[in-house]
Image (spheres, rainbow, N blue to C red):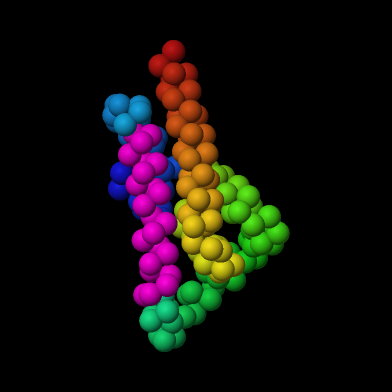
Amino acid sequence: MLWSVSPFGEAKVGIPYGLFNDVNIYLVFVVCFAANVLVFPIMRYFLHSINTYCLRWYFYKKAALWVARRAKVGSGEKIKKYGFWGLMFFVSLPIPGTGVYAGTIAAYLFNFETKKAFLANTFGIFISSVIVWVTTLATMEGIAA
């Protein structure tokens, strides 16, 4: 569960970790998915409250602007163009740099309505979690055979 909440792995690391440590395959999926979904409201609160306060400090502001520029350049045009579906697709990619943290930041930067952003992130996390879960189970079957 901790890997799934962590920005360094999310469910992309939590699911394989749980499966390779012989945790029930369904429990791993549900717990990692749920933990990853919980990141959205936490990040949204951070971006609305704490981020605004911290922008007064030079080093924080410099880092925040770097993250914002990188998010807008990376997939920003696609997310802006396709809206909900673009954000969902972006979050659903099970590769580093995508996921609920990046999706929440993108939704914040492009002024997505909170409910739509939450749904896009949740559906994206679900798709990504299914891909990682099935791939990990198939890999484990291949190793065991």
Q: Residue at x 64, y 52 (%)?
A: 86
Does 18 appear in magenta?
no
Say whether residue 42 is magenta.
Answer: yes
Quarter the C terminus occupies:
top left
Across and down, in percent, residue 80 comes to 66, 62
The answer to whether 104 is drawn above or below residue 20 in the figure is below
Q: Against 138, is 114 above or below?
A: below
What x and y, as percent, mark residue 105? 50, 64
Helix, strand or loop: magenta stretch: helix
**Residue 23: percent from the left, percent from the top?**
29, 29
Q: Quadrant of the N terminus?
A: top left
Numbered circles on residues, count:
0
Return the residue nearer the eye: 125 or 23: 125
Is there any visible trace of residue 59 in the rendered image?
no
Instruction: Report the residue at 33% width, 39% height from top.
Output: 31
Q: Position of residue 56 (x, y in %)?
A: 41, 86
The image quarter containing residue 39 is: bottom left
| The image quarter in which residue 17 lies | top left
Write the residue at 44% across / 42% down.
12
* Residue 87: quadrant of the picture: bottom right
Q: Is residue 84 left or right of residue 129?
A: right
The residue at 53%/76% (across/down) is: 65
Q: In the image, which residues are magenta?
A: 28-50
Could you say which is closer to the camera, residue 10 or residue 45?
Answer: 45
One can see residue 51 in this view: yes
